[in-house]
Amino acid sequence: MLKLGKLITATTTSFEIFNFDMSVMARTGRPTIVDFSIEPEPFGTGGFRKAFKATSNDRGFNGSTWVVKRYLEKAAVDIIAIGQTLEEHTKKVVQMHCLAQNFAAKLKEELHASDDEILFGETMSYKKICMIDWNDWQRVCNSRRFYRGDIPQIYQQQWEHM
């Protein structure tokens, strides 16, 4: 709600969003422009990136919270040191995620068709991920839906059922 007498300083950031299309094995040529409101402080940091919660009112991205991950400075230096750009590395991350998503979906279809779902158990599922150009490649990042919960606990439960 609006607070009288208080200046609203929240702004949105426009991103160029690129998706990977498994049917043609190519990244989309034209980006989709999406405005996100990003929380100023990361809710998680580790590995290669800082993770920020973000929301959008744009079609296809509204109605849920997203995670925008931005490379840590040390990770960016390491990626560049091995001869890759941040753009190339992020493209690979998105491409490999989409490939794993496709494998998991195909496995689920095959198990369902052969009526082996009960024997095999639950299969993994992957959600939408995309590459974001945030004005320049020094700020390239990726985005995915945010899910509440204790992730290590979820993995532990999956291992216990195996």
Image: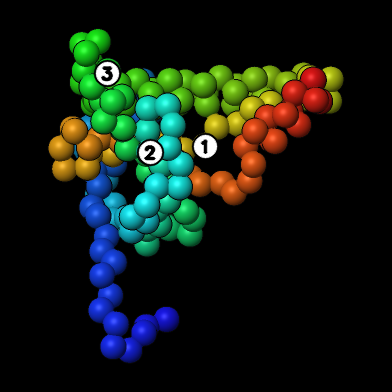
- At x 29% / y 66%, what residue is drawn? 10
- At x 16% / y 43%, what residue is drawn? 135
Which of the two labelled residues, at mark 2 and mark 1, occupies the earlier sequence position?
Answer: 2
Query: Residue 97, position in %: x, y?
Result: 46, 25
Which of the two labelled residues, at mark 3 and mark 2, occupies the earlier sequence position?
Answer: 2
Residue to which mark 3 is pinned: 79
In this picture, residue 135 sits left or right of residue 69: left
- Crowd around label 2: few <14 · some 14–19 · many ≥20 (10 Å): some
Query: Disc 1 versus disc 3: distance between alpha carbons?
Result: 25 Å
- Crowd around label 3: few <14 · some 14–19 · many ≥20 (10 Å): some
Query: Disc 2 versus disc 1: distance between alpha carbons?
Result: 19 Å
In what element is the residue under mark 1?
Answer: loop
Circle 3: residue type? Ile
User: Which numbered circle lies on residue 50?
Assistant: 2
> Cβ–Cβ below 8 Å for labels 1 and 3?
no
- Check the picture and name the quadrant holding the C terminus: top right
In what element is the residue under mark 3?
Answer: helix
In the rendered view, tell whether residue 118 sits above or below residue 9. Answer: above
In what element is the residue under mark 2?
Answer: strand
Circle 2: residue type? Lys
Residue 35 lies in quadrant: bottom left
Query: Residue 124, position in %: x, y?
Result: 64, 27
Q: Out of 19 and 142, give the one closest to the viewer.
A: 142
Query: Residue 54, position in %: x, y?
Result: 39, 53
- At x 63% / y 46%, what residue is drawn? 149
